[in-house]
Amino acid sequence: MMLELHNENKLSLSAKLFVSFLKIGPTTFGGGYAILPVIDKELTEHRKWLSPKEMSEITALSGAAPGGIGVNVAALAGYRIAGIPGLLSAVIGISMPTILIMLILCAAASGFSDNRYVQAALHGIKPTVVALIVYAAIRMRKQALHNPVTWGVSATCLILLLFFPVQPLFVLGIGIVIGLVAEAVYTSKSSSGKKKEQGRYHSM
């Protein structure tokens, strides 16, 4: 996959990134996490620019960074695929339709805010946004929740967010600390295992 990307011109990839994110922007309602399934499918299944694991890592980093997660994912994915030109192309592509649509909606809001058909359409969109967010979580689960520790971290953070007045940044910090501790424990066990094997070898 990466060999194909290296063989293709960065400007050509940037143009394709721009078109892809330009299509994604105006067709996804709800923004935020609701846009992730669409980006995921476009980059991993349709274009095959990224593997599911790479996309999961980009999503995790984007959620930890400040700002809108859709734009963050576009920036990191664009950079991963085509460097700085790719980053700029992806961010401009995903932002441009939203800016134009919001300008139009703001201009028309005064005339249609009380329209019953507009209100009915908005009420119909809200449940679909919830479905998109749940779908994004399910797809991320396949890459993120693969052992009891990760399941425990996820459940603990969910309980904290639902029942306690904690900031999302604090929850992300918990995940970072547990990840570092788990890596340190794994490294320590690997090192001790290697030393035991070396000791057995020398004793022979």
Image: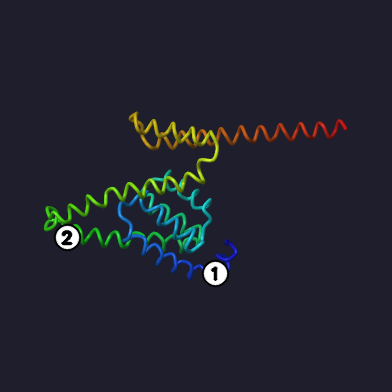
Q: Residue 20, percent across and down?
A: 41, 64
* Mark 1 residue element: loop
Residue at screen point 60% across, 64% down: 3
155 horizontally vs 182: left or right? left
Q: What amino acid is found at the position of numbered circle 1 in the picture? A: Glu
The residue depicted at 63 percent of the width and 35 percent of the height is: 186
Task: Assess disc 2: are there few (<14), some (14-19) or many (≥20) residues with their C-alpha within 10 Å of its C-alpha.
Answer: few
- Which quarter of the picture shows residue 182? top right
Image coords of residue 70 (percent x, y): 38, 53
Residue 88's label in the rendered image is: none
**Tally of numbered discs:** 2
- Give left or right: position of 195 versus 8: right
Give the amino acid type for the residue marked by disc 2 in the picture. Ala
Q: Is residue 199 left or right of residue 47?
A: right
Q: Give the residue at x 79% y 34%.
A: 198
Q: Secondary structure at mark 2?
A: helix
Q: Are dots 1 and 2 in contact, CB under 8 Å? A: no
Q: Nearer the viewer, residue 134 or 24?
A: 134
Numbered label attached to residue 107:
2
Does label 1 or label 2 sit earlier along the sequence? 1
Q: Residue furthest right?
A: 204
**Quadrant holding the C terminus:** top right
**CA gap, disc 1 to disc 2?**
42 Å
Residue 50 lies, in percent from the top left, at 52, 58
Q: Which mark is residue 8?
A: 1
Q: Position of residue 1 (x, y in %)?
A: 57, 62
Q: Residues within 10 Å of mark 1 (few under 14, many from 20)?
A: few
Q: Residue furthest top?
A: 164
Is 161 above or below relative to 1? above
